[in-house]
Image (tube, rainbow, N blue to C red):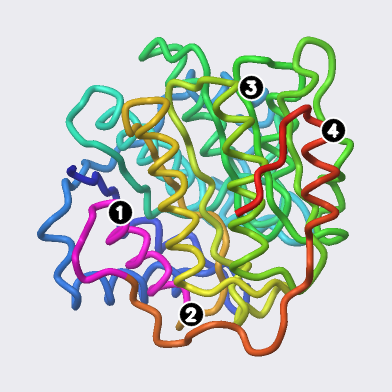
Amino acid sequence: MTTALVYDPFNLQHTFPHHPEHSGRLEGTWHLLEADGILERLLRVESRPAPIEAITAVHTAYYVEQLEKMSSRGRGKVDPDTYVVEATWQASLLAAGGLLGVTDAVLTGQAGNGFALVRPPGHHARPHTGMGFCLLGNVAIAARHAQKVHGAGRVLIVDFDVHHGNGSQEMFWDDPSVLVFNTHQYPYYPGSGALDEIGAGSGQGYTVNLPLPPGVGDAGYLAAFRQVLVPVARRFQQDVILLSAGFDAHWMDPLANERLSVAGYAALIGELMALADELCGGRLVGVLEGGYNLDVLPHCVLTTLRTLNADPAGVSDPFGPAPGRETDVRDLIAGACRLHGVRRRET
Protein backbone atom coordinates (compact mmCIF):
# COMPACT_ATOMS: atom_id res chain seq x y z
CA MET A 1 0.00 0.00 0.00
CA THR A 2 1.32 3.42 -0.99
CA THR A 3 0.43 6.45 1.11
CA ALA A 4 0.09 9.81 -0.62
CA LEU A 5 1.24 12.99 1.14
CA VAL A 6 0.94 16.67 0.32
CA TYR A 7 2.86 19.50 1.97
CA ASP A 8 3.53 23.05 0.80
CA PRO A 9 5.94 25.36 2.67
CA PHE A 10 3.89 28.35 1.50
CA ASN A 11 1.38 27.45 4.21
CA LEU A 12 3.96 28.58 6.75
CA GLN A 13 3.35 32.16 5.62
CA HIS A 14 -0.12 32.11 7.16
CA THR A 15 0.98 32.81 10.72
CA PHE A 16 0.49 35.28 13.54
CA PRO A 17 2.78 35.88 16.54
CA HIS A 18 1.74 34.21 19.82
CA HIS A 19 -1.34 32.58 18.28
CA PRO A 20 -1.75 28.83 19.02
CA GLU A 21 -2.30 28.04 15.33
CA HIS A 22 1.01 29.24 13.84
CA SER A 23 3.63 28.12 11.35
CA GLY A 24 5.68 26.24 13.96
CA ARG A 25 3.10 23.47 13.95
CA LEU A 26 4.14 22.45 10.44
CA GLU A 27 7.81 23.41 10.67
CA GLY A 28 8.57 21.07 13.55
CA THR A 29 6.50 18.30 12.03
CA TRP A 30 8.24 18.53 8.68
CA HIS A 31 11.67 18.51 10.31
CA LEU A 32 10.85 15.25 12.11
CA LEU A 33 9.52 13.63 8.92
CA GLU A 34 12.70 14.60 7.08
CA ALA A 35 14.91 13.28 9.86
CA ASP A 36 13.02 10.02 10.03
CA GLY A 37 13.34 9.28 6.32
CA ILE A 38 9.71 8.28 5.84
CA LEU A 39 9.23 10.85 3.06
CA GLU A 40 11.25 8.65 0.70
CA ARG A 41 8.64 5.91 1.06
CA LEU A 42 5.56 8.07 0.36
CA LEU A 43 3.93 9.26 -2.85
CA ARG A 44 4.34 13.03 -2.90
CA VAL A 45 1.34 14.85 -4.34
CA GLU A 46 1.82 18.19 -6.06
CA SER A 47 0.38 21.13 -4.13
CA ARG A 48 -2.20 23.17 -6.02
CA PRO A 49 -4.86 25.72 -5.10
CA ALA A 50 -8.44 24.51 -4.88
CA PRO A 51 -10.69 25.78 -7.67
CA ILE A 52 -13.27 28.31 -6.55
CA GLU A 53 -16.14 26.11 -7.69
CA ALA A 54 -14.98 23.37 -5.31
CA ILE A 55 -15.00 25.85 -2.43
CA THR A 56 -18.40 27.34 -3.25
CA ALA A 57 -19.85 23.84 -3.27
CA VAL A 58 -19.92 24.19 0.54
CA HIS A 59 -19.29 27.91 1.22
CA THR A 60 -21.29 30.93 0.13
CA ALA A 61 -19.76 32.94 -2.70
CA TYR A 62 -20.09 36.09 -0.59
CA TYR A 63 -17.94 34.68 2.22
CA VAL A 64 -15.30 33.47 -0.23
CA GLU A 65 -15.13 36.93 -1.82
CA GLN A 66 -14.88 38.65 1.57
CA LEU A 67 -12.10 36.34 2.73
CA GLU A 68 -10.08 37.09 -0.39
CA LYS A 69 -10.61 40.84 0.06
CA MET A 70 -9.65 40.73 3.74
CA SER A 71 -6.45 38.89 2.88
CA SER A 72 -5.61 41.37 0.12
CA ARG A 73 -5.81 44.16 2.70
CA GLY A 74 -3.08 42.40 4.65
CA ARG A 75 -4.66 41.78 8.05
CA GLY A 76 -7.97 41.18 9.77
CA LYS A 77 -10.08 38.74 11.77
CA VAL A 78 -13.15 36.75 10.84
CA ASP A 79 -13.82 36.16 14.55
CA PRO A 80 -11.86 36.90 17.76
CA ASP A 81 -9.86 33.66 17.39
CA THR A 82 -9.33 33.54 13.64
CA TYR A 83 -6.80 35.83 12.00
CA VAL A 84 -6.21 36.76 8.38
CA VAL A 85 -2.89 38.00 6.96
CA GLU A 86 -1.77 38.72 3.42
CA ALA A 87 -0.81 35.08 2.78
CA THR A 88 -4.04 33.66 4.19
CA TRP A 89 -6.04 33.52 0.97
CA GLN A 90 -3.38 31.64 -0.97
CA ALA A 91 -2.56 29.40 1.98
CA SER A 92 -6.25 28.55 2.40
CA LEU A 93 -6.57 27.68 -1.29
CA LEU A 94 -3.49 25.48 -1.05
CA ALA A 95 -4.72 23.75 2.12
CA ALA A 96 -8.04 22.84 0.52
CA GLY A 97 -6.42 22.08 -2.83
CA GLY A 98 -3.74 19.90 -1.27
CA LEU A 99 -6.42 17.73 0.28
CA LEU A 100 -8.21 17.55 -3.07
CA GLY A 101 -4.97 16.35 -4.65
CA VAL A 102 -4.55 13.57 -2.11
CA THR A 103 -8.23 12.64 -2.50
CA ASP A 104 -7.73 12.43 -6.27
CA ALA A 105 -4.68 10.20 -5.84
CA VAL A 106 -6.60 7.78 -3.63
CA LEU A 107 -9.83 7.73 -5.61
CA THR A 108 -8.01 7.17 -8.92
CA GLY A 109 -5.94 4.32 -7.47
CA GLN A 110 -2.55 6.05 -7.56
CA ALA A 111 -2.32 5.57 -3.79
CA GLY A 112 -4.03 3.30 -1.30
CA ASN A 113 -4.59 6.05 1.26
CA GLY A 114 -3.26 9.50 2.00
CA PHE A 115 -2.71 12.45 4.29
CA ALA A 116 -2.74 16.21 3.74
CA LEU A 117 -0.24 17.99 6.00
CA VAL A 118 -1.82 21.41 5.56
CA ARG A 119 -2.96 24.48 7.41
CA PRO A 120 -4.96 26.59 8.16
CA PRO A 121 -7.30 23.90 9.51
CA GLY A 122 -10.91 23.72 8.43
CA HIS A 123 -13.47 21.79 10.45
CA HIS A 124 -14.91 24.82 12.31
CA ALA A 125 -15.44 26.86 9.13
CA ARG A 126 -19.14 27.35 8.50
CA PRO A 127 -20.84 27.88 5.13
CA HIS A 128 -20.90 31.65 5.56
CA THR A 129 -17.85 32.35 7.73
CA GLY A 130 -14.65 31.06 9.27
CA MET A 131 -14.20 30.48 12.98
CA GLY A 132 -12.00 28.71 15.52
CA PHE A 133 -8.70 29.13 13.60
CA CYS A 134 -10.40 27.75 10.44
CA LEU A 135 -10.98 29.60 7.16
CA LEU A 136 -12.19 27.04 4.61
CA GLY A 137 -13.87 23.71 5.35
CA ASN A 138 -11.16 21.52 3.87
CA VAL A 139 -12.72 18.14 4.62
CA ALA A 140 -16.19 19.28 3.54
CA ILE A 141 -14.76 20.61 0.27
CA ALA A 142 -13.07 17.24 -0.28
CA ALA A 143 -16.30 15.35 0.46
CA ARG A 144 -18.23 17.25 -2.21
CA HIS A 145 -15.29 16.92 -4.60
CA ALA A 146 -15.26 13.15 -4.10
CA GLN A 147 -18.95 13.06 -4.98
CA LYS A 148 -18.96 15.46 -7.92
CA VAL A 149 -15.67 14.55 -9.58
CA HIS A 150 -15.24 10.89 -8.68
CA GLY A 151 -18.84 9.75 -8.33
CA ALA A 152 -18.59 8.73 -4.69
CA GLY A 153 -22.17 8.14 -3.62
CA ARG A 154 -21.60 8.16 0.13
CA VAL A 155 -18.81 9.79 2.11
CA LEU A 156 -18.01 9.17 5.76
CA ILE A 157 -16.30 12.01 7.62
CA VAL A 158 -14.67 10.98 10.90
CA ASP A 159 -13.43 13.78 13.17
CA PHE A 160 -11.39 12.94 16.28
CA ASP A 161 -10.20 16.50 16.96
CA VAL A 162 -10.80 17.40 20.60
CA HIS A 163 -13.06 20.28 19.50
CA HIS A 164 -16.37 19.52 17.83
CA GLY A 165 -16.30 19.86 14.04
CA ASN A 166 -19.32 22.14 13.94
CA GLY A 167 -18.61 23.42 10.45
CA SER A 168 -18.51 19.98 8.85
CA GLN A 169 -21.66 19.06 10.76
CA GLU A 170 -23.52 22.18 9.60
CA MET A 171 -22.59 21.70 5.96
CA PHE A 172 -24.10 18.22 5.83
CA TRP A 173 -26.81 18.55 8.50
CA ASP A 174 -29.67 17.56 6.20
CA ASP A 175 -27.68 15.46 3.70
CA PRO A 176 -28.00 11.66 3.88
CA SER A 177 -25.11 11.17 1.44
CA VAL A 178 -22.47 12.36 3.95
CA LEU A 179 -22.31 10.86 7.43
CA VAL A 180 -20.38 12.98 9.95
CA PHE A 181 -19.02 11.18 13.04
CA ASN A 182 -17.48 13.35 15.78
CA THR A 183 -15.67 12.49 19.01
CA HIS A 184 -14.88 15.61 21.06
CA GLN A 185 -14.58 17.01 24.56
CA TYR A 186 -17.93 18.34 25.78
CA PRO A 187 -19.00 20.80 26.97
CA TYR A 188 -16.17 22.71 25.36
CA TYR A 189 -15.44 24.98 22.42
CA PRO A 190 -17.40 25.61 20.20
CA GLY A 191 -20.32 24.49 22.41
CA SER A 192 -22.00 22.24 19.86
CA GLY A 193 -21.94 18.48 19.43
CA ALA A 194 -24.44 17.18 21.95
CA LEU A 195 -25.48 13.55 21.73
CA ASP A 196 -28.94 14.43 20.40
CA GLU A 197 -27.59 16.47 17.48
CA ILE A 198 -28.29 13.86 14.81
CA GLY A 199 -29.17 15.84 11.68
CA ALA A 200 -32.49 16.98 10.28
CA GLY A 201 -34.89 16.21 7.46
CA SER A 202 -33.56 13.55 5.11
CA GLY A 203 -30.23 13.83 6.93
CA GLN A 204 -31.64 12.80 10.30
CA GLY A 205 -29.46 10.04 11.73
CA TYR A 206 -26.49 10.88 9.52
CA THR A 207 -24.82 13.06 12.15
CA VAL A 208 -23.31 11.07 15.03
CA ASN A 209 -21.80 12.84 18.02
CA LEU A 210 -19.87 11.34 20.93
CA PRO A 211 -19.62 14.26 23.42
CA LEU A 212 -16.89 12.99 25.73
CA PRO A 213 -16.28 14.30 29.24
CA PRO A 214 -12.75 15.40 30.17
CA GLY A 215 -10.29 12.65 31.01
CA VAL A 216 -11.14 10.11 28.30
CA GLY A 217 -8.08 8.29 26.98
CA ASP A 218 -7.02 5.47 24.71
CA ALA A 219 -9.50 2.87 25.98
CA GLY A 220 -12.54 5.16 25.83
CA TYR A 221 -11.79 6.51 22.38
CA LEU A 222 -11.14 3.03 20.99
CA ALA A 223 -14.39 1.76 22.51
CA ALA A 224 -16.29 4.65 20.90
CA PHE A 225 -14.86 3.74 17.51
CA ARG A 226 -15.45 0.00 17.84
CA GLN A 227 -18.88 0.12 19.43
CA VAL A 228 -20.45 3.11 17.70
CA LEU A 229 -18.52 4.08 14.56
CA VAL A 230 -17.96 0.58 13.20
CA PRO A 231 -21.62 -0.53 13.19
CA VAL A 232 -22.79 2.87 11.95
CA ALA A 233 -20.29 2.76 9.08
CA ARG A 234 -21.22 -0.81 8.18
CA ARG A 235 -24.84 0.27 7.90
CA PHE A 236 -23.92 3.39 5.89
CA GLN A 237 -21.67 1.60 3.36
CA GLN A 238 -19.51 4.59 2.38
CA ASP A 239 -17.34 4.80 -0.73
CA VAL A 240 -14.51 6.69 0.98
CA ILE A 241 -13.56 7.75 4.51
CA LEU A 242 -12.25 11.26 5.15
CA LEU A 243 -10.57 11.93 8.50
CA SER A 244 -10.33 15.29 10.23
CA ALA A 245 -7.19 14.43 12.18
CA GLY A 246 -6.84 16.80 15.10
CA PHE A 247 -4.22 15.68 17.62
CA ASP A 248 -5.26 17.99 20.44
CA ALA A 249 -6.91 15.21 22.45
CA HIS A 250 -3.39 14.13 23.42
CA TRP A 251 -2.86 14.25 27.16
CA MET A 252 -0.09 16.88 26.84
CA ASP A 253 -1.98 19.29 24.61
CA PRO A 254 -2.39 22.74 26.19
CA LEU A 255 -5.87 23.48 24.82
CA ALA A 256 -7.92 20.55 26.13
CA ASN A 257 -8.28 17.90 28.83
CA GLU A 258 -8.50 14.48 27.18
CA ARG A 259 -5.95 11.69 27.66
CA LEU A 260 -5.08 10.11 24.33
CA SER A 261 -1.51 9.01 23.69
CA VAL A 262 0.34 8.81 20.38
CA ALA A 263 -0.11 5.04 20.52
CA GLY A 264 -3.82 5.62 21.14
CA TYR A 265 -4.04 7.67 17.96
CA ALA A 266 -2.29 4.88 16.07
CA ALA A 267 -4.95 2.45 17.27
CA LEU A 268 -7.71 4.75 15.99
CA ILE A 269 -6.01 5.04 12.60
CA GLY A 270 -5.72 1.26 12.54
CA GLU A 271 -9.46 0.92 13.19
CA LEU A 272 -10.21 3.31 10.34
CA MET A 273 -7.90 1.42 7.99
CA ALA A 274 -9.59 -1.87 8.84
CA LEU A 275 -12.99 -0.28 8.29
CA ALA A 276 -11.87 1.18 4.96
CA ASP A 277 -10.44 -2.18 3.88
CA GLU A 278 -13.71 -3.88 4.75
CA LEU A 279 -16.13 -1.39 3.23
CA CYS A 280 -14.51 0.88 0.64
CA GLY A 281 -11.41 -0.65 -0.87
CA GLY A 282 -9.07 0.87 1.72
CA ARG A 283 -9.86 4.42 0.60
CA LEU A 284 -8.97 6.58 3.59
CA VAL A 285 -7.78 10.20 3.40
CA GLY A 286 -6.74 12.27 6.42
CA VAL A 287 -6.18 15.99 6.83
CA LEU A 288 -4.52 17.83 9.70
CA GLU A 289 -6.79 19.83 11.99
CA GLY A 290 -5.69 20.72 15.55
CA GLY A 291 -2.76 19.75 17.77
CA TYR A 292 -0.93 22.49 19.65
CA ASN A 293 1.86 20.87 21.65
CA LEU A 294 4.83 21.44 19.35
CA ASP A 295 6.70 18.43 20.72
CA VAL A 296 3.78 16.01 20.48
CA LEU A 297 2.27 16.97 17.12
CA PRO A 298 5.25 15.85 14.99
CA HIS A 299 5.20 12.38 16.53
CA CYS A 300 1.43 12.11 16.03
CA VAL A 301 1.80 12.90 12.33
CA LEU A 302 4.83 10.64 11.89
CA THR A 303 2.99 7.78 13.61
CA THR A 304 -0.10 8.38 11.48
CA LEU A 305 1.96 8.18 8.29
CA ARG A 306 3.79 5.08 9.50
CA THR A 307 0.48 3.42 10.32
CA LEU A 308 -1.11 4.35 7.00
CA ASN A 309 1.94 3.10 5.09
CA ALA A 310 2.37 -0.09 7.17
CA ASP A 311 5.86 1.08 8.10
CA PRO A 312 7.63 -1.51 10.27
CA ALA A 313 9.07 1.27 12.44
CA GLY A 314 5.64 1.55 14.04
CA VAL A 315 4.60 4.02 16.71
CA SER A 316 6.86 6.96 17.60
CA ASP A 317 5.78 7.82 21.13
CA PRO A 318 8.47 9.23 23.45
CA PHE A 319 5.77 10.57 25.82
CA GLY A 320 3.94 7.37 26.74
CA PRO A 321 0.43 7.00 28.15
CA ALA A 322 -1.32 9.56 30.29
CA PRO A 323 -0.71 9.14 34.02
CA GLY A 324 -3.61 8.15 36.25
CA ARG A 325 -7.02 6.69 35.45
CA GLU A 326 -9.25 7.71 32.59
CA THR A 327 -12.93 8.62 32.69
CA ASP A 328 -15.42 5.80 32.14
CA VAL A 329 -17.67 6.39 29.10
CA ARG A 330 -19.57 3.12 28.96
CA ASP A 331 -22.90 4.79 29.71
CA LEU A 332 -22.34 7.43 27.04
CA ILE A 333 -21.47 4.79 24.46
CA ALA A 334 -24.54 2.76 25.41
CA GLY A 335 -26.70 5.87 25.00
CA ALA A 336 -25.22 6.60 21.57
CA CYS A 337 -25.89 3.02 20.48
CA ARG A 338 -29.52 3.26 21.56
CA LEU A 339 -30.01 6.62 19.90
CA HIS A 340 -28.59 5.46 16.58
CA GLY A 341 -30.11 2.01 16.63
CA VAL A 342 -26.94 -0.07 16.67
CA ARG A 343 -26.08 -3.03 18.85
CA ARG A 344 -23.33 -2.33 21.33
CA ARG A 345 -20.39 -4.70 20.98
CA GLU A 346 -18.21 -5.25 24.04
CA THR A 347 -14.45 -5.24 23.34
Query: Front-most of 57 and 114?
Result: 114
Q: Look at 82% across and 64% down and name the residue there.
A: 213
Quarter-of-image position of residue 37: bottom left
Residue 68 visible from this viewpoint: no
Query: How many numbered circles are shown?
Result: 4
Who comes first in sequence, dot 4 or dot 3?
Answer: 3
Q: Quadrant of the N terminus?
A: top left
Quarter-of-image position of residue 46: top left
Q: Look at 37% across and 48% down and name the residue there.
A: 116
Q: Which residues are magenta?
A: 296-314
Residue tagged 3: 61
Who comes first in sequence, dot 3 or dot 2?
Answer: 3
Who comes first in sequence, dot 1 or dot 3?
Answer: 1
Q: Is residue 21 left or right of residue 4?
A: right
Who comes first in sequence, dot 1 or dot 2?
Answer: 1
| Mark 1 crowd level (few <14, some 14–19, many ≥20, 10 Å Cα) | some
Residue 310 visible from this viewpoint: yes
